[in-house]
Image (tube, rainbow, N blue to C red):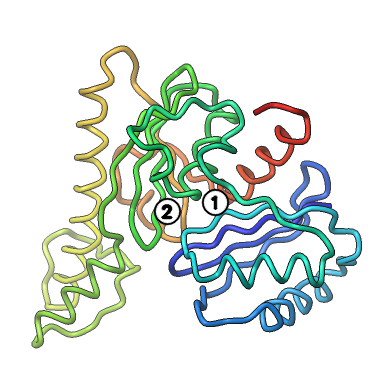
Amino acid sequence: MLLVIDIGNTNTVLGVFDGSRLIKDWRIRTERDTTEDELYALFSSFFTQAHIDEGTIERTIISCVVPPLMMPMDALCRKYLRHAPMWIDARSASGMPILYNNPSEIGADRIVNAVAAFQKYKVGLIVIDFGTATTFDVISPKGEYLGGVISPGVKIAAEALFQKASKLPRVEMFIPPATVIGKDTNTCIQSGIIYGYAGLVDGIVGRVFEEMTDSQPKVIATGGLAPLMYGVCKTIEVVEPQLALEGLRIIDEKQRNGFQ
């Protein structure tokens, strides 16, 4: 079996595949000051609850944008799972041409999303990942990674507002108000954050469409806030909640089959 781990700035998502079937997945907070023993204690409890024998995990593949966690995660795999993990970077994109000025700058999470999305749809794509940052990754109809856009995430934007505007209250920002025009401070803030961010998303997608004159890409979304934003954005066509995990599985499969 295969253990896949996507380490983001806010959350870490992991899953276990048996062949192409995702048996179980989990989402945890990313803790930078953790040890391999603490990580193993947590992972082991997950495996036990899911009735997964960790001795059957033959391989581990990891995408990580948090460098301090690379050493303890590597140690966990070697110490407890008895194998070295595979780490994702631009060189392990398994056949996807990276048309970026410096491919080493691309986050591993963006690579696995692009690989999974193109493998599934085989068309030009805009992949929007609603994480700590919101990233837009653009793939050509030929399966080339063209580049993208990085903007502050929804939570970062909201937190900046609450910190800098001392009289504004913290509100539940994951419930879109019924109308754009708010009737009290809470709904005004909710509207500004959620509908304002929807405008950002739709605006960037529209500009990408203008630059890709030879085709109109399919727009897909992933990440923790993708379901919320799907409901308020006009351009998002589908949500793929397990895109990163699937991308890791695909890259592992391609590497084992000899595709570089």
Q: CA distance from mark 2 to mark 1?
A: 8 Å
Farthest residue in the top direction? 214
Q: Residue at x 78, y 46 (%)?
A: 21
Question: Label 2's element?
Answer: helix
Query: How many numbered marks, from 0 up?
Result: 2
Whether residue 208 is situated above or below residue 193 in the rendered picture: above
Q: Residue at x 17, y 71 (%)?
A: 189
The amino acid beneath tag 2 is: Ala
Question: Marks 2 and 1: CB-CB under 8 Å?
Answer: yes
Whether residue 178 is situated above or below residue 256 in the rendered picture: below
Q: Which one is nearer the viewer's eye here, 227 or 183?
A: 227
Q: Position of residue 219 (x, y in %)?
A: 39, 34
Side of 64 where 176 appears, left or right: left
Q: Position of residue 194 (x, y in %)?
A: 25, 60
| Quadrant assignment, res 181 | bottom left
Q: Which one is nearer the viewer's eye here, 183 or 132?
A: 132
Q: Residues within 10 Å of mark 2 (few under 14, many from 20)?
A: many
Question: Label 1's element?
Answer: loop
Whether residue 45 is situated above or below residue 18 in the rendered picture: below
Q: Position of residue 141 (x, y in %)?
A: 45, 18
Which residue lies under the disc numbered 1?
241
Q: Residue at x 55, y 35 (%)?
A: 115
Q: Residue at x 38, y 45 (%)?
A: 105
Which residue lies under the disc numbered 2?
226
Side of 49 where 138 appears, left or right: left
The amino acid beneath tag 1 is: Pro
Q: Position of residue 243 (x, y in %)?
A: 56, 46
Quadrant position of the C terminus in the picture = top right
Which of the two discs, 2 and 1, labels the residue nearer the N terminus? Answer: 2
